[in-house]
Image (cartoon, grey):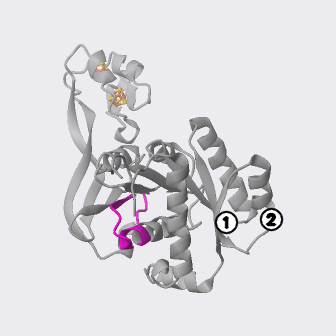
Amino acid sequence: MIKSKHHIIAIASGKGGTGKTFVATNLFHALKETGENVMLIDCDAEAPNALAFFDSRQADCIEVTQQVPVIDSAKCTFCGKCHEYCAYNAIFILPSLEIIKVIEDLCHACGACLVACKYDAITQKSVTLGQVSLNSINENVNLIEARTKIGVMTPVLVIKAAIRQIDHRNNIVILDSPPGTSCPFIHTVAAADYVVLVTEPTPFGLSDLKRSVETLKQMNKPFGVIVNRAGIGNNEVYDYLESEGIELLLEIPFDKEIARICSNGGMVVNHNPALKHQLLKLEQKITDKHGIGHHQR
Ligand code: SF4
Ligand code: SF4
């Protein structure tokens, strides 16, 4: 069979702490153990932690920067045009006091203010938003981490830079998505062919799951659900999945041993062959059903 196309799976959840990284890292490790060409990208750029689970070597590190405006108050006439053009309220101006400032955290680097200024008062400077590190577990780069600099308003540009590093020679790419349903989540899952939502069977889990489901439906993304820590909570998540016709991909029981291995930075699939088998079967099922990956193992 020709290895013609890669398949991108995002592992996501409506909130942190549901076991999203646990699923992403263990699926990655299980696939890698079978000899599969697989890449993991940690897109949870505000709190990336997938790297901590592996012995890896950094092959490269890319600085992600953004051009923000710098205003020369000596040339500025305080006409207010740049402030008017800025759709993000990133320029603060008090003409009567001859005060003008760029609020860098709000700036989206759209360049509109540069076009607006007829007095040559605006130039640009480069600011660092974060880094994308390229890491190898064996010889190939297969573990990528997006990491936003502390204080940066949004991790989206850093996440996009990490996703651009996808090596198309990999048959499977796993994206560990940021939690929630806002822009970082949307930009991550937009790059995926299929989304696995990880939830837990509790009222909080259900309410976050509903938000994620609504977002993915609007995006027209195929998805299914893994219930992690099954056995805690109640049946409401299952009732919801059934009533909405959402596929329950897998249940991972609540197990103190799993929690212990994870908290020690270990791979659960090394100790739990049944889970390893289930995760591999799950990936194969997704690939077969959605007909994108034409790989063989
Ligand atoms: S570059 Fe765009 S977002 Fe930034 S200050 Fe200028 S107009 Fe506003
Ligand atoms: S458009 Fe130029 S001159 Fe006018 S307020 Fe902005 S920086 Fe100053």
Q: Tell which circle, 2 or 1, labels the residue nearer the N-terminal end.
A: 1
Label placed on residue 200: 1
Is any part of residue 179 visible from this angle? no
Q: Is residue 94 left or right of residue 131?
A: right
Q: Which residues are magenta?
A: 30-49
Going by the picture, which residue comes out furthest to the top?
Answer: 118
Q: Residues within 10 Å of mark 1 (few under 14, many from 20)?
A: many
Q: Is mark 2 within 8 Å of ligand 1?
A: no
Image spot of residue 10 (x, y percent): 48, 53
Q: Nearer the viewer, residue 178 or 136?
A: 136
Residue 99 lies, with reference to residue 236, above or below; the image says above
Label 1 element class: loop
Dot label at residue 235:
2
> Looking at the picture, how far across and down is residue 38, in whole percent?
35, 61
Name the secondary structure under disc 2. loop
**Ligand 2, what quadrant?**
top left
Q: Amino acid at mark 1?
A: Glu
Q: Quadrant of residue 229?
A: bottom right
**Is-magenta flag for residue 205?**
no
Q: Is residue 245 visible?
A: yes
What is the distance, in whole Å, between disc 2 and disc 1 at their CAs? 11 Å
Q: Residue at x 40, y 63 (%)?
A: 48
Image quadrant assignment for residue 127: top left
Residue at horizontal 31%, vertical 19%?
Answer: 78
Q: Residue at x 56, y 68 (%)?
A: 19
- Residue 131 in the figure: left or right of residue 239: left
Quarter of the rendering containing residue 200: bottom right
The picture places residue 192, in percent across and down from the top left corner, at 46, 46
- The reply to whether dot 2 and dot 1 touch (C-beta < 8 Å) is no
Tell me which amino acid carries mark 2: Asn
